């Protein structure tokens, strides 16, 4: 079915031009949008949405997410209070991910997809871990995402931290999924990935013309471990395995880098994804994009699913710790689309749209849009969301699934997950 967004004010996400028009939106992965002046005489089977007084623009996308953390909010505190970042991983996140089973992964995926959709994101790049439930985990996530209507680029977080059996299962799940799906090769932080595993992951990347999605120097511990055990810096080690050569590779965090490492990233093809709020939560440092080049995008690191919120955090914290301004904050917010398009990934075409019911006491136009974007626009302004031409959120309500039914399921699974974590 073709959607018609009538009486819309369209904001071109690249040029920020404001266009008053009617928009025809065709459904499908290869669908498109078309501006028309006159909608009289259109077929009656079109679905019309009145966008008078509203703004329409390209929907959003998440550059780095963690489905596995979706059921963490409100969970009981860890048995031991972490004193540093390695202990945060050991006593919180590695307890949680080991406790995931098929049903809790499914619940986590639905919760993530729903939250993304209602916050205006129709594409998610996710980095998943469930060491005791690896086989088929990416299928569980993709099926839930697709039921909600969220396009995706998934990977499994391969690591040596749980032994060789877990490593082999992670490699096998990655290869199995890559054979039939657009995907990346996931690696946990380099300090949990030995040379043999990194070589195998790099070989998979080459075999499937993919990229590596990995956490990089999120904490200074990553650098210290690498220098002690491999006698080189983290990014230099990754470069030795050819990971930076792929324009599909994503380097998460990148907080504790030397000048030579920044130069390698700047002059090669990999992308960097900033996750400011997660860095604040874990007290690992502050992101600074200076010297890294233009290939910087934004993620949430599983903290939440609201990309407008991530952009604001990057901007405000960056006033003290980064070289970010209005334009570069917006560029980082939108760079995920450039990453997806330039690498030929599907699911993020022009027929992915968000309708914003945004009311301001001051004028809004091309010249001052970035001021509204930084200081005022929020996910509360998202009224309708269109994914691949299909209306998945209408009047703030999901159209593809029963939200109440899913929330009953996620709450049930959260309690069971927390019980397993406490054993």
Image: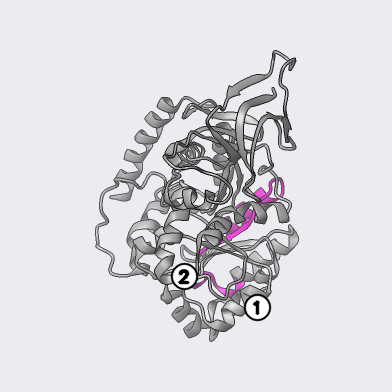
Residue 321 numbered tag: none
Does residue 197 appear to the left or right of 356 in the view shown?
Answer: right
SS type, badge 2: loop
Q: Residue at x 50, y 79 (%)?
A: 226
Q: Residue at x 30, y 44 (%)?
A: 419
* Depth order, front residue of 90/217: 217
Q: Which residue is mark 1?
A: 240
Q: What is the total number of numbered labels drawn onto the structure image?
A: 2
Looking at the image, residue 230 lies above or below residue 337: below
Q: Residue at x 56, y 27 (%)?
A: 51
Q: Which residue is mark 2?
A: 322
Image quarter of the N terminus: top right
Outermost residue toward the top in this view: 44
Q: Find the magenta span and give its range.
A: 167-196
Looking at the image, residue 375 lies above or below residue 163: above
Instruction: Tell me the mark number nearer the camera, choosing from 2 and 1.
Output: 2
Looking at the image, residue 350 lies above or below residue 131: above
């Amino acid at each position: 079915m073709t959607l018609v967004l009538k009486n819309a004010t369209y904001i071109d996400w690249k040029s920020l031009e404001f266009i008053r028009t009617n928009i025809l939106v065709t459904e499908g992965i290869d669908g498109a949008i078309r501006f028309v002046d006159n909608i009289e005489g259109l077929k009656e089977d079109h679905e019309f949405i009145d966008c008078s007084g509203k703004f329409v623009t390209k929907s959003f996308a998440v550059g780095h997410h963690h489905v596995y953390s979706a059921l963490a909010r409100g969970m009981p505190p860890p048995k031991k209070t972490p004193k540093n970042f390695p202990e945060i991983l050991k006593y919180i996140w590695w307890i949680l991910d080991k406790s995931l089973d098929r049903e809790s992964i499914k619940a986590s995926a639905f919760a993530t997809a729903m939250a993304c959709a209602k916050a205006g994101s129709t594409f998610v790049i996710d980095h998943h871990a469930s060491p005791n439930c690896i086989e088929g985990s990416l299928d569980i996530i993709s099926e839930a995402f697709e039921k909600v209507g969220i396009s995706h680029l998934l990977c499994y977080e391969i690591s040596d931290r749980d032994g060789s059996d877990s490593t082999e299962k992670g490699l096998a799940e990655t290869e199995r999924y890559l054979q039939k799906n657009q995907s990346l090769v996931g690696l946990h932080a380099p300090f949990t990935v030995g040379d043999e595993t990194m070589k195998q992951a790099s070989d998979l990347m080459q075999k499937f013309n993919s990229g590596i999605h990995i956490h990089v120097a999120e904490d200074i511990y990553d650098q210290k471990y690498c220098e002690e055990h491999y006698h080189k810096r983290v990014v230099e080690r990754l470069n030795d395995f050819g990971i930076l050569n792929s324009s599909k590779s994503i380097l998460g965090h990148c907080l504790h880098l030397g000048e030579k490492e920044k130069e390698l990233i700047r002059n090669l093809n990999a992308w960097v994804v900033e996750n400011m709020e997660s860095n604040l939560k874990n007290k690992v440092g502050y992101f600074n994009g200076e010297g890294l080049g233009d290939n910087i995008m934004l993620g949430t690191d599983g903290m939440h699913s609201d990309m407008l919120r991530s952009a604001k955090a990057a901007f405000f914290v960056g006033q003290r710790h980064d070289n970010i301004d209005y334009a570069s904050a917006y560029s980082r917010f939108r760079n995920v689309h450039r990453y997806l398009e330039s690498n030929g990934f599907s699911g993020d075409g022009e027929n992915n749209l968000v309708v914003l019911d945004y009311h301001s006491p001051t004028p809004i136009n091309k010249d001052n849009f970035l001021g509204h974007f930084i200081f005022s626009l929020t996910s509360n302004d998202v009224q309708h969301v269109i994914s691949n031409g299909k209306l998945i959120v209408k009047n703030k309500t999901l159209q593809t699934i029963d939200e109440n039914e899913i929330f009953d399921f996620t709450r049930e699974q959260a309690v069971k997950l927390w019980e397993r974590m406490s054993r």
